[in-house]
Amino acid sequence: MNWNLRPDQWDQLDEATAPAGTVLLQAGDVSSRMLVLVEGEIAIQAEGTVVARLREPGTIVGEMAGLLGSPRTATAVAMTDVVYRTVDDVVSLMEERPDVGMAVARTLAHRLNLVQSYLADVRRQYADRSDQLGAVETVLAALSSAPSVDIDPGSDREREPNI
C-alpha cells in the first residue's frame, strides 16, 4: 500500500522548485517545515551517507523534526531538478487538515513497522552471541522499551551534537 500523500491532499500547498544539488532540509536545523515531493528525486543523507532515495510523488520529507520540534537528523538534497510542495508548520496543517494528519500518521507507522521488523531480525541474528555483538539484544531491548523523553542532543561532556 502507498502511504504517501495523494495529489488532492497537497494541491493547496505552496509549490517550489529546486535544481539538482540544492539542500532542501539541513541536518541540525530546527524548524516545523515539511516537504511533499511532486517530481524528481531527493536523497536523504545522515552523517554523509545516503540512507534513502525518494522518487515517489507524494512522499513526505521532514515531518519528524517538524512534529517533534527537534533538530533534523538528516539532510535532504535534490538529486535531480525537483518540484515539491512546502508546509511551513506541519503541526498546524495536521490540525487543520485531518486527512493530511492521517496520511502523516500512516507514513510514520509504516516506517516504524519497517524498523521494528529489521530490529527483530537483528535480534534473532545476534541472540546467541556471547561477544560484543551479543550486546545488540540488550541495547535494542532498552531502546524499544524506553519512555518518550525530550531529545537533548549532545552529552554532558559535549553539549553540541556531533552532526
Image (spheres, grey):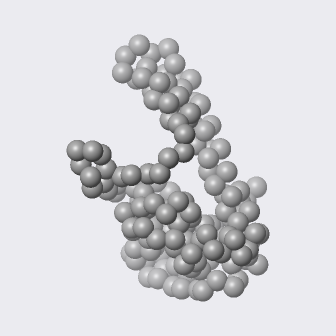
Q: How many marks?
A: 0
Taking the spot 36% from the left edge, 21% from the top edge, the residue there is 132
In the rendered view, does 33 fall on the left or right side of 103? left
Picture coordinates of residue 102, whole percent (x, y) = 74, 62
In the rendered view, does 90 fall on the left or right side of 21? right
Picture coordinates of residue 87, whole percent (x, y) = 58, 77
Residue 162 seen in the current view: no
Position of 7 relative to 42 (above/below): below
Picture coordinates of residue 94, whole percent (x, y) = 68, 70
In the rendered view, does 5 fall on the left or right side of 132? right
* Closer-to-camera residue (131/143): 143
Which corner quadrant holds the N terminus?
Answer: bottom right
Extreme-left residue of the structure: 157
Kindly indicate the quadrant of the structure image that contains residue 119: top right
Picture coordinates of residue 50, whole percent (x, y) = 42, 56
* Closer-to-camera residue (6/103): 103
Taking the spot 36% from the left edge, 52% from the top edge, the residue there is 153
Which corner quadrant holds the C terminus?
Answer: bottom left
Position of 15 relative to 147 (above/below): below
Taking the spot 60% from the left edge, 39% from the top edge, the residue there is 116
Residue 73 seen in the current view: yes
Kindly indicate the quadrant of the structure image that contains residue 103: bottom right
* Closer-to-camera residue (81/72): 72
Taking the spot 53% from the left edge, 66% from the top edge, the residue there is 66
